Image: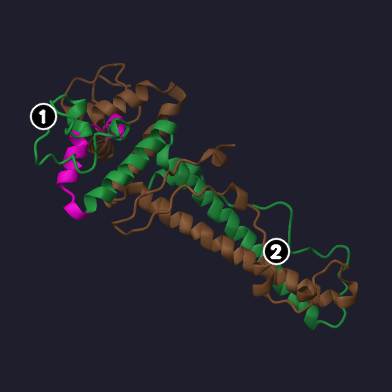
Amino acid sequence: MGSGSSPCASCKLLRRRCAKDCIFAPYFPPDDPHKFAIVHKVFGASNVSKMLQELPIHQRADAVSSLVYEANARMRDPVYGCVGAISYLQNQVSQLQMQLAVAQAEILCIQMQQQGPDQLPAATHPSMMDCDVKSLLLSGNNTSDFGDQMPQFLSYTSSSNNVIQDPLKRESLWT
Amino acid sequence: MTSTRCAVCKYFRRRCPPDCIFSPHFLNDNPQRFTCVHKIYGASNLGKLLQETPMQLRADTIESLYYEAKCRIQDPVYGCAGIIWSLHQQIQIAQSQLARARAEIAFLDANVVVAEPTPSPGEPVVQQNGVDYGLDDPYDFWFY
């Protein structure tokens, strides 16, 4: 709340009177001016105010936190902002998926080798008998627990000529 | 006014000068692109950001801003940050699963070496049902 003694960080920066019902006051205390400065620089106070007004009160704190996060990401990387981080993390997830698939194929290989040929199901393909991880992966036996849940929402690299694909295939993240 | 104005100048109903900073990136045939970015960042901030960016990087800058703006419109509370948080979670889960798989490989390999592995009923299995993902407090994530 805007107190009589000290205006919130936003009103201080904007040099205006901090009203009792100032929409920024609960989220931008005067002891952290940098927080609002960053958000104002990237999004603009007016836009932030509109965004907060459109949200129920119980969601505004999280909205401010995410805006601050995005603003900081944009300040650190003015060209790619958060998108750079998303691309990097998605790459990490892909690599981990690959490693997991290799490990799971290796487990299958070991198990098959331990069981021995006479204990394998009749439908087992002969190539499985002489298994190696690569052949298992190529035969499509790799599984990933969360493969179906991975949204391929962008194919984005640091190349300046690449265009971000339509990234908003995020429905599966929130179901 | 002719239709050769860029989407930004058309939006603001002004003349589009030859050196308009927006025109290479906001073509007239896609007004929604600018509307989206303008809603979140504002034209003034956008203009300042573009002026501070080298020309060869402006296209990528606009693309990333457009993507983030779309994310924010679709998820007004978390925007792109929500995606990042979700990816961090998925990485943690994947790392945990990978660690379990590798432990299982080590266990199976050990079984091959030992002549007669006869695990007792109480012997713990490598792959456990409950996984402590060790998720950080999500609010730790916001504050860098």
* Magenta region includes residue A146: no
Q: Is residue A134 above or below residue A3?
A: below
Per the image, the residue denoted by label 1 is: B15
Q: Chain of mark 1?
A: B
Q: Chain of mark 2?
A: A
Tell me which residue sits at (85%, 83%) in the image: B115
The residue most toward the right is: A118
Q: Is residue A111 above or below residue B143?
A: below
- Of helix, strand and loop, which mostly describes the magenta segment? helix
Mark 1 residue type: Arg
Q: Give the structural element (helix, strand or loop) at label 1.
A: loop
Coordinates of residue A171 in the picture (x, y in percent) = 54, 38
Badges 1 and 2, same chain: no
Query: Magenta stretch?
Result: B37-56
Residue A128 found in image quarter: bottom right
- Quadrant where the N terminus of chain A is found in the figure: top left
- Quadrant where the C terminus of chain A is found in the figure: top right
Chain B colour in the picture: green
Viewer-proximal residue, B120 or B80? Answer: B80
* Magenta region includes residue B48: yes
Q: Nearer the viewer, mark 1 or mark 2?
A: 1
Q: How is the image coloured?
A: by chain
Label 1 Cα crowd, 10 Å radius (few <14 / some 14-19 / many 20+): some
Q: Is residue A45 above or below residue A92?
A: above
Chain A colour in the picture: brown
Per the image, the residue denoted by label 2 is: A141
